[in-house]
Amino acid sequence: MEVKVDQEIDIQNEEKAPLPIVIVDEEEKVILRKVDVHLTPLMLVTYMLQYLDKITSGKVPLP
């Protein structure tokens, strides 16, 4: 994946300004898809564990 960078010059300080990262729509879709593929299963497992904890703790008798 190639990242495109625009170079800008700050005229007042005669220094280079931070280079912004430009992401094209196609690259954004690829990045979001990768994030979705990795985070969705983790979120589902976390939700399932939370649900199991909730239903099992409701059945435990208090001393």
Image: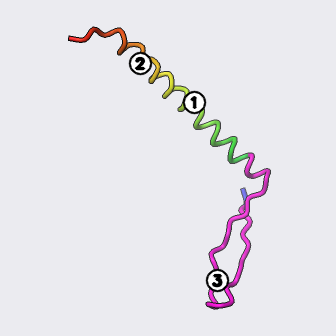
x and y percentages locating residue 2 in the rendered image: 73, 60
> Residue 16 shows which numbered tag?
3
Q: Magenta span covers which residues?
A: 3-29
Q: CA separation, marks 2 and 1?
A: 20 Å
Tag in front: 2 or 3:
2
Q: CA separation, marks 2 and 3?
A: 55 Å
Please give the residue where the numbered disc 2 appears in the rendered image: 54
Query: Of callouts 2 and 1, which one flags the residue occurring earlier in the amino acid sequence?
Result: 1
Please give the residue where the numbered disc 1 appears in the rendered image: 41
Q: Nearer the viewer, residue 61 or 26?
A: 61
x and y percentages locating residue 5 in the rendered image: 72, 69
Do the numbered discs 2 and 3 sit on residues whose CB atoms are within 8 Å? no
Q: Secondary structure at mark 2?
A: helix
Q: Does the magenta run of residues contain 13?
A: yes
Categorize mark 3 by other alpha carbons within 10 Å: few (<14), some (14-19), many (20+).
few
| Left or right of 26 in this view: 46 | left
**Which kind of residue does numbered mark 1 sit on?**
Pro
**Which kind of residue does numbered mark 3 sit on?**
Lys
Q: Write down the quadrant of residue 34 in the picture.
A: top right
Residue sitting at x 67%, y 85%: 10
